[in-house]
Amino acid sequence: GAGVSQSPRYKVTKRGQDVALRCDPISGHVSLYWYRQALGQGPEFLTYFNYEAQQDKSGLPNDRFSAERPEGSISTLTIQRTEQRDSAMYRCASRAGGHPNTGELFFGEGSRLTVL
Amino acid sequence: SQQGEEDPQALSIQEGENATMNCSYKTSINNLQWYRQNSGRGLVHLILIRSNEREKHSGRLRVTLDTSKKSSSLLITASRAADTASYFCATVPGKGGSEKLVFGKGTKLTVNP
């Protein structure tokens, strides 16, 4: 697609339920990043992929959070047994790739998760 | 954890004035990027400055980088109401290894018409 697409845009769930957030990056982009953003704060790094390989998952808060990108394109961030503190905007971004440590990220509009 | 720290946290100016935002970071970097975020929307890349560059311009934007002080500044000249947004600096901490891009907490800029 033309930009990074995230779904759902809004998700309300009850505490204890599992949720899956989807990211469809810009076609051909090598790298895909997941961030979490609280209101009034900067994006907090969660994890990123180059192609299908998860390169760094140091930002995932605990083992209830996982992410995959099985075919090197679409990615899913899964939160198991959700808790109220998981409520936030979850943002996905992709990068064309190339030389490491260069290049801008293109962000999607985000998925707003509310855990009741 | 946040790598960059923007200053000030909030800035309010009149249309036509210049706005300066600063960013300090902790570890060595290969480049530093600035992003803008309009009220709850996705972040938009503004400019990237490499560690071997001291100054870069893009339209009304001017970015400086001082690697000895581990700091960068973003200057917006002749500001417009449409520049109202939050501005974030972002870096890849360290050299080599992970390419995670770490953002600061941002400066919220309000340009009054």
Image (spheres, helix red, strand yellow):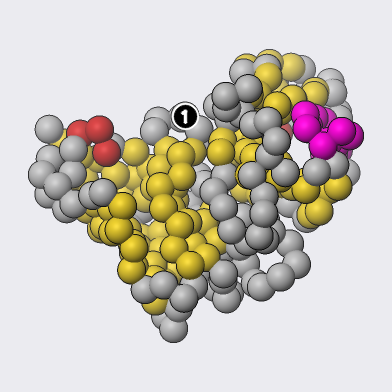
Residue A8 in picture, x, y percent from top left? 68, 17
| Residue that label 1 marks | B41
Residue B5, can we see it?
A: no
**Quarter the C terminus of chain A occupies:** top right
Q: Position of residue B98 (x, y in %)?
A: 73, 62
* Residue A20 appears in view: yes
Which region is colored magenta?
A: A64-79
B11 left or right of B47? left
Q: Quadrant of the N terminus of chain A?
A: top right
- Asked whether residue A69 is drawn in magenta, I would say yes
Kindly identify the residue that appears in the image at 78 percent across and 48 percent down. Answer: A50
The chain that hosts pointer 1 is: B
The structure residue drawn at horizontal position 80% and vertical position 24%, both measured from the top left corner, is A20
- In the rendered image, which quarter is residue A19 located in? top right
* Three-letter code, disc 1: Arg
The answer to whether B97 is drawn above or below residue A114 in the figure is below
Q: Secondary structure at mark 1?
A: loop
Between A42 and B29, the one lying in front of the other is B29
- The quadrant in which residue A82 appears is top right
Q: Is residue A53 above or below residue A28?
A: below
